[in-house]
């Protein structure tokens, strides 16, 4: 990043750093070569005149945002092809810089539609569909959520009833609430979509399955007969994406287009089948994906061999959500901490210099723990993703021994990270004062991109309870004397421990504290359920009656993982001793602050004494002092160029006020000296006798 025109405050902050920023940046991204490659690709986007001439996102209407999003998406894809970039991570680096926090109207075509065909179709189906999809003849999305059902997949109401006489499925939206609602890229962009519908054959229901459906003409994009489709209207954010609704009126599609069968616990297994519509609402028989579930010509249904194979894809999706949330929080920290080093406010004593607001301990109390969380969540996302890659071959071969633990962890971390990031970004905005409320800060754009993660791909409470269900199974096994796998071995351990916490606040003692808290809450939830069942409650009633405690247990489990993984990660050999020293302070702050924010759960059984709480409180304040000289360097190590941040407040050079002024001058309303509303409203108010003139102007 350019060192030119850096403000004295930021230059001084960087000169005080006690560690090598490059060393930490390389560690976080996965090596020097990858960091260089990322910067190379992002610099191509930064220098591209196409992106420089784009209208500011914040000054666009929703329709303009969609138009710009589509234009950028097509241009980006062409550039990636020109550069020969096929690696998904490298493509992400380029896209992140070229269209930061602007969800592509073609995003689900790349992220869901193409991978579904590529990984789940038969060779014959790939041969037929992939060339069309890769060349954008078929543009697709994924339609699951309905007006009345989202996370509860088994409750979906769209039906696909097999007719053995014609060897077709009849897709129908029998109720108002059965209309597909919310799928991205659906309203105006896609001409095909993978539809989740309840499969009926031979008079029996076989649960949700996927079908490939053509919804628009591939010639003129007109909507096909039997289909109603459109956009759902303006949302909290996601203006660049045409989230839509979709319904079917007894639409017939051929048998050969069924893809895979949904599991009965609301997940999308690889075993589900897919289908494609022809131009006239019919799909050829040869298009059926029969790799797993099957419906024979006579209507006989064949179940998949293992409905848990989809856990792998779920882990992959959820690990990406954890990483997305972590990036959003990290970027918010970059903006708020850099701005806090530039902004000066309120003289410390009469006649004295106004201090940087980052020097105020209260500002540190709000921002530094979030900085620590951003590092912790990024490391957590990396762990889950890398672990998935390590076991992926085993998963494909049907060896799912390691999957239940990883699946439960990824579900919980998805919820934990999106909750933490959403709340944290809002704190960062508030810490920027009034300017944080402006779109110029970049923070609103980041927030509306991250916060939907709390509900998409599984509502967070449901995700936490999925994790809790696995923890209950582990607790039961531990009580039976069985050995638990990997990370969950802490469950069922002896809870009659006292904390080893001292003034030093050793990392090992922090991990022990989090293990104790999680183990105790898991046991408390299990005991609550057992008590309710013994009192005459049915299993589902006992589960609901214990669900708050189950949620607490799952959250504590995820929090423990983030702490322990952070501790393990900073022992990496690639980190210099100086970097380890700084990161140890950040890691300690993450653990200490988490304890103090949830103190009741750590003290309830006397694990901590009042004296030890005093240690932790003093340590937190001392850590603020340790981190303060390195705060700007720590956010620099995230290595986000200004184009990714899109922020006047978080600029690398610190030229905040000139940037804010330039942003204000560029506002469309400032392009005319007298706005049209003066003639329409203000002039008649000021001079009522001119009303007739104003009316005439309004007609023009």
Image (tube, helix red, strand yellow):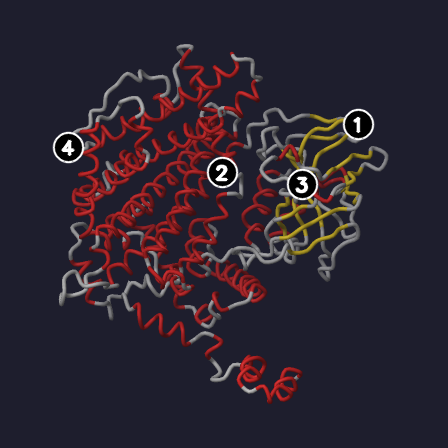
Q: Nearer the viewer, mark 3 or mark 1?
A: 1
Q: Earlier in the sequence, mark 3 or mark 4?
A: 3
CA–CA distance between discs 4 and 1? 69 Å
- Number of other residues with Cα within 10 Å of mark 4, as a class: few under 14, some 14 to 19, many 20 or more: few
The part of the image, by quadrant, that contains residue 357 is: bottom left
Q: What kind of element bears circle 4? A: loop
- Which badge, 3 or 2, comes first in the chain's sequence? 3
Residue 203's tag is 1
- Which residue does the numbered mark 2 point to in the structure image? 460
* Location of mark 4 (residue): 503
The location of residue 646, given as percent across then percent down, is 39, 62
State whether residue 600 is above or below residue 69: above
Work out which residue is located at the far right of the displayed protein and give it: 165
Label 4 vs label 1, nearer the camera: 4
Q: Position of residue 116 (x, y in %)?
A: 59, 42
Mark 2 or 4 closer to N-term?
2
Distance Cα–Cα, label 3 vs label 2: 39 Å
Would you name the residue on which mark 3 appears?
124
Helix, strand, or loop for circle 3? helix
Horizontal side of 506 relative to 464 (left or right) equals left
Between marks 2 and 4, how big is the CA–CA gap?
37 Å
Q: Residue at x 36, y 42 (%)?
A: 377
Numbered circle sitting on residue 363: none
């Amino acid at each position: 990043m350019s060192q030119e025109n850096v403000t004295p405050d930021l230059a001084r902050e960087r000169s005080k750093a006690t560690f090598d920023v490059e060393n930490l940046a390389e560690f976080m991204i996965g090596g020097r070569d990858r960091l260089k490659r990322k910067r190379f690709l992002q610099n191509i986007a930064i220098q591209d005149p196409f992106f420089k001439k784009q209208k500011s996102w914040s000054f666009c209407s929703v329709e303009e945002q969609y138009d710009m999003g589509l234009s950028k998406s097509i241009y980006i894809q062409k550039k990636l092809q020109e550069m020969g970039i096929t690696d998904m991570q490298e493509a992400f680096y380029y896209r992140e810089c070229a269209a930061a926090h602007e969800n592509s109207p073609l995003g689900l075509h790349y992220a869901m539609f193409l991978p579904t065909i590529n990984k789940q179709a038969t060779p014959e189906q790939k041969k037929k569909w992939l060339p069309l999809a890769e060349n954008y003849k078929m543009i697709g999305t994924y339609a699951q959520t309905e007006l009345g059902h989202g996370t509860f997949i088994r409750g979906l109401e769209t039906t696909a009833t097999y007719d053995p006489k014609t060897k077709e499925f009849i897709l129908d939206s029998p109720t108002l609430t059965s209309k597909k609602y919310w799928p991205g890229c659906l309203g105006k962009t896609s001409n095909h979509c993978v539809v989740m519908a309840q499969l009926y054959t031979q008079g029996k229901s076989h649960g949700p399955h996927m079908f490939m459906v053509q919804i628009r003409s591939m010639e003129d994009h007109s909507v096909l007969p039997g289909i109603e489709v459109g956009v759902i209207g303006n949302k909290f954010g996601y203006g660049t994406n045409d989230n839509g609704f979709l319904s079917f009126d007894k639409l017939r599609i051929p048998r050969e287009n069924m893809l895979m069968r949904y599991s009965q616990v609301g997940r999308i297994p690889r075993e589900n089948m897919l289908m494609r519509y022809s131009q006239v609402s019919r799909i050829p028989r040869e298009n059926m994906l029969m790799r797993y579930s099957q419906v024979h010509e006579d209507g006989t249904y064949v179940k998949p061999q293992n409905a848990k194979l989809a856990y792998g894809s779920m882990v992959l999706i959820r690990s990406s959500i954890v990483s997305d949330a972590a990036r959003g929080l990290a970027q918010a920290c970059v903006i708020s901490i850099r701005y806090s080093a530039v902004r000066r406010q309120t003289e410390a004593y009469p006649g004295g210099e106004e201090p940087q607001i980052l020097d105020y301990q209260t500002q540190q109390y709000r921002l530094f723990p979030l900085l620590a969380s951003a590092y912790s969540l990024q490391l957590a996302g990396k762990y889950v993703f890398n672990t998935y890659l390590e076991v992926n071959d085993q998963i494909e071969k049907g060896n799912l021994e390691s999957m239940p633990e990883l699946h439960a962890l990824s579900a919980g971390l998805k919820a934990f990270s999106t909750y933490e990031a959403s709340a944290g970004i809002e704190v960062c905005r508030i810490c920027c004062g009034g300017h944080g409320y402006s779109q110029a800060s970049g923070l609103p754009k980041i927030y509306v991109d991250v916060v939907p993660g709390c509900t998409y791909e599984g509502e967070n409470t449901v995700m936490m309870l999925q994790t809790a269900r696995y923890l209950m199974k582990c607790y039961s096994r531990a009580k039976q004397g069985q050995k638990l796998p990997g990370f969950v071995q802490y469950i069922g351990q002896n809870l009659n421990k006292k904390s080893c916490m001292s003034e030093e606040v050793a990392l090992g003692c922090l991990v022990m504290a989090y293990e104790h808290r999680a183990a105790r809450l898991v046991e408390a939830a299990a005991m609550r359920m057992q008590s309710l069942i013994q009192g005459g409650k049915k299993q589902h009633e006992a589960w609901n009656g214990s669900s708050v405690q189950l949620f607490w247990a799952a959250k504590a489990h995820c929090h423990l993982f983030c702490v322990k993984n952070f501790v393990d990660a900073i022992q990496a050999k690639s980190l210099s001793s100086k970097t380890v020293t700084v990161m140890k302070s950040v890691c300690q702050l993450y653990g200490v602050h988490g304890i103090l924010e949830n103190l009741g759960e750590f003290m309830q059984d006397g694990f901590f004494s009042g004296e030890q709480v005093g240690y932790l409180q003093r340590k937190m304040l001392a850590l603020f002092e340790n981190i303060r000289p390195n705060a700007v360097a720590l956010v620099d190590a995230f290595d986000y160029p200004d184009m990714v941040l899109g922020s006047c407040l978080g600029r690398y050079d610190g030229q905040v006020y000139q940037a804010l002024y330039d942003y204000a001058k560029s506002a469309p309303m400032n392009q005319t000296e007298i706005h049209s509303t003066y003639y329409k409203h203000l002039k008649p108010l000021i001079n009522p006798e001119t009303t007739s003139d104003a009316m005439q102007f309004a007609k023009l």
